[in-house]
Image (cartoon, helix red, strand yellow):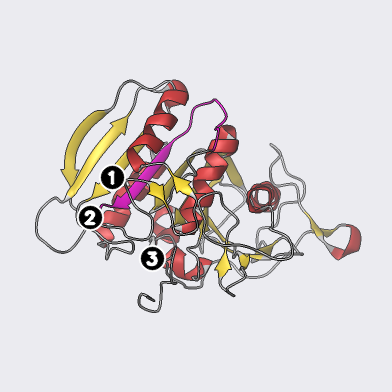
Amino acid sequence: MCVLVVAGCGSSDGGGGSGGVAGSGGAAGSGGVEAFDCDVSEPANCPEVPPQTIDASRPAQVQAPSDYTTATRYPLVLVLHARGSSAAATAIYLGATQRIEARQFVLVTPDGTEDTEGRLAWNAGASDSTFEPEAPDDSAYVLGLIEEAKRTYRLDPSRIYLMGSSNGGHLAIDILCDDPASVTAAVSQAGALSADTTCAEGPTSLLSVHGTSDETVAVGGGERESGIAILSAINLLAGFGERSGCDPFVILPNLNLLPEPPGSETRVRSYSNCNAEAENGLWAVQQAPHVPDFTDDARDLWFDWLFAR
C-alpha cells in the first residue's frame, strides 16, 4: 500500500523541497570538473558561492544556508531516502530541509537507483530490493559524496551526519557498521541491519527511531518477505553499544513524538558513557506504524540528539 505523496511503498517514506545557495565557482579540473580544496586549513580555492550538485556521474543535490560563507565550517547532513521515495521528499519528512537556516548546516540529498521493480532504492543489506544487471555499491557512493562535499564546501570534518528512513536507514546503519569512523553520528527511522552482518569494531553514535507496530520493518526483527533476516532494534543497538564500549543501557524518560494520542508514547533506551563520547539510543514509538506522523517537536529532538555528538 502506498502512503501519501511523500512515501513510497514497501520499505519507504520521506519529504522534498528546494532552496540554499545557487551557482558554482572554482578552478576547472580535468574534463571540466570543478576542482576545489575547501577541506584544507587555509583553502586557496574554496568558492563563496558553491555548486548546487556534486558527483558529475551520479549527481546529488546540495543546499546550504542563505548566509553561507567560507569563513565558517558547517556540519554536513546527508539524507538517504526510503525505497520508492526520493531524497527531496525524505529530507522534508525527517525535517532536514526546514532546518538548514536555523541549524546552519550543508544538506546533501542523493537519490538511489531503480531496482527491478522500478523504484528508487539503495543496495543495503536489510533491503528487499534487487538490482539488475549489477547491484551498485551504494556505501562507497555515499562515502564518496562525503569526501567530495568536504572538498567543495567549507565543512567541519568532526560533524558529518547521516539521516535515513526505512531503506535509507538500512544504508546509514550499514555504513556505521562497516566504517565506524566515516561519520560522526546517524539517525535511522525504521532502519534495520541484516542479522548475518559482522560489524567493524569502533565507537559509533546511532539513534534508531522505530514504531512498534511497523509491519514493513519489524521492530522485533525476524525474517522479511524477501527471506532476509534482520536484527531486532534492541539487539541492533546492543551490538553498537558493545562495540562502542558503552555502559549498560539505561531507560530514560519517555518522549512525545506523535500528535496523537496525548502523552509521551515513546520509550527511550540509551547506551552512553561510550568511547570517543559516542552514544547509541533507541526511541521505540509505541503503536506507531512504518511511516508515523511525527510532530515538528519530534524532529527538533532528533536534531538536538544528532548535533550533540
Please state the horizontal and vertical placement of residue 94, each as a whole percent of the image: 39, 60
Residue type pointed to by label 2: Leu
* Residue 214 % position (x, y): 30, 58
Q: Residue placed at 55% from the left, 32% from the top?
A: 199
Instruction: Residue 283: give its label.
Output: 1
Residue underneath mark 2: 257
Q: If the image is split into quadrants, where does the C terminus sit?
A: top left
Instruction: Report the span colored magenta.
Output: 197-212
Q: Secondary structure at mark 3?
A: helix
Towards the viewer: 93 or 250: 250
- Which residue shows up at 71% across the image and 48% down it? 151
C-alpha span from label 3 to label 2 = 13 Å
Determine which residue is flagged by label 3.
93
Callout 1–callout 2 Cβ contact below 8 Å = yes
**Would residue 70 appear left or right of 81 to someone viewing this image?**
right
Q: Residues within 10 Å of mark 3 (few under 14, many from 20)?
A: many
224 w.r.t. 238: above or below = below
Q: Does 260 appear above or below 229?
A: below
Q: Find the residue positioned furthest to the right.
A: 30
Where disc 1 sits, the SS reads strand
Mark 3–mark 1 distance (CA, rounded to whole Å): 17 Å
